[in-house]
Image: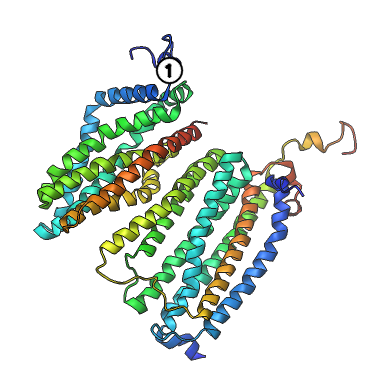
Amino acid sequence: MSNFFAMGGYGFYIWMAYGALAVIVVAEVVALRVRRRAAITQARLTEPEMTTFIRRGPAGSAD
Amino acid sequence: MNLFRYSSPPAFYPLAGKLIPWFAWTAAALLVLGLWIGFGIAPTDFQQGEAYRIIFVHVPTAWMSMFIYLVMAFWGALSLGFNTRLSAMMAQALAPTGALMTFIALWSGGLWGRPTWGTYWAWDARMTSELILLFLYFGVMALRNAIADDRRADRACAVLALVGAVNVPIIYFSVKWWNTLHQGSSVSLTSSPKMAAIMLTGMLVMALAAWSYTIAVTLVRVRTIILERECGAAWVFDLSEVRAG
Amino acid sequence: MDMPIENQLRGDAPARDHGALAGFYWALARDLQLAFRSRAELGVQLLFYVVVVSLFPLASTPERTLLATMGPGVLWVAALLASLLSLPRLFATDHLDGTLEQIALSPYPLPALVSGKIAAHWLTTGLPVAVLAPLLGQQYYLDGESLAVLAAALLIGTPILSLLGAIGAALTLGLKGSGSLLALLILPLYVPVLIFGAGAVDAVRAGLGAAANLSLLGAGLLVAIVGAPFAAAAAVRIALD
């Protein structure tokens, strides 16, 4: 197992390279999650256009 | 089947949502397979020892960095030609992933160069062109960021991406020319070990993993961009995830 | 030329030619006139070039052979920076007072008008640099043949800088921090010009001919002349919409 990590003496370089890949992939996915959350929250708080006209019934109805 | 109906954001949004898991799981599976080939099966290289195993991350990300730029320019061209919002959003979604791929290619290339040729950086044609490609990505992203109006940003970034795409081969050729003239160090950070078939297979599997990952991540990002830009549209407000909050 | 610009652009005079060449000359003449009125600004930009070129030896070494090796590169990079410094002048001043919109609305083809502006920009920026560089090259102990090739390379290359720079200037019109953004956008595209331009002088110093480098520069210039005005015109319309 320690042989695997040592990688014939080149362990530092190999794991720095693959480590950067792992960090960046995780960071990208996490950042996307955060951005999507923020977009969804913003969308929920934004009053949609034309809803009052399309979805509500005539004045006085139950809607 | 009329595919053009998917060029409207409300039609594309759910389609993309269904596609993401397929590409994400495929990417994960291919990554595991690629790493297994790269570390488990591929033999130690005679000249470079274990250090060559970095090519399984360096080469696929370098390929993707260039491919993504071309695809970004393609979507930009479509958005200019057909004046479609969604094409521009796709271009917008591709840029960050392309820049990250370029960075990983440069980073891993340097880490490969240090143990094998003694230096983290060498001004060889491919690494230098890759560095300039990173600047080109930054340029597109900075321009997008600087322009407040979405549609103007769409068109400006499309023009810039196209001008960049035309220039990338010219830049590569010029750097290669410059490099061969100044062949002081005969170091090329990308002269790879003679490719055993298994090494090539590993690289191809990793490349497919990167491609699949890119598609998954870009679809997620474009869905978010659609939400951000179509905010206030009735169909957005009606989405289940927006209603649930 | 003494009519208000709207009238000129509307072409109030009977049978006025609104072709590309007429547009080119109109824009060229107008921009040269305007540039001539602010001669001091042009002079300052040229002085910038002189100062920057003089800084490098002070920062490194006055040693002859090293300076001669560095010289072509320094003279070229300074030319790139001088070009970047002067590019905002191309569209921004017209944009600020609304003239650019009038220009875009005129019956002249916009790429022709943009070409005229670019030509004026080159005549007031690139050409003086190309003329001045051989004089400044003396500071780098470059010999006569190298200086001649340097001047030739700059004469062919600086128009490319103006042409490509115009695209960047149009894309970044009116944006905050447009100066640095313009540099970020344009400098990567300048790299081939830099490589072949400085490479021409290096080749001559190494005893190989400069023909290959200069031909490639020439080819690049032709491609830029054909393509850049249209890209820049498209970028201007995008910025104005």
- Asked if C59 appears above or below B45 in the picture, the reply is above
Where is residue B223? Give x, y as percent: 65, 53
- Asked if B223 appears above or below C154 in the picture, the reply is below
Q: Is residue C164 visible?
A: no
- Asked if B9 appears above or below B173 in the picture, the reply is above
- Tell me the quadrant of the picture where the N terminus of chain C can be found: top left
Q: Chain of mark 1?
A: C
Closer-to-camera residue (A46/C133): C133
Where is residue B214? Give x, y as percent: 58, 62
Residue depicted at x 42% and y 54%: B169
Residue depicted at x 75% and y 50%: B239
Locate residue C122 relative to residue C13 in the image: left or right: left
Residue depicted at x 42% and y 22%: C19
Say which residue label 1 marks.
Answer: C9
Closer-to-camera residue (A22/A38): A22
Where is residue C65? Give x, y as percent: 11, 60
Locate residue C213 relative to residue A56 in the image: left or right: left
Q: Callout 1: 10 Å neighbours few (<14), some, many (20+)?
A: many
- Residue type pointed to by label 1: Leu
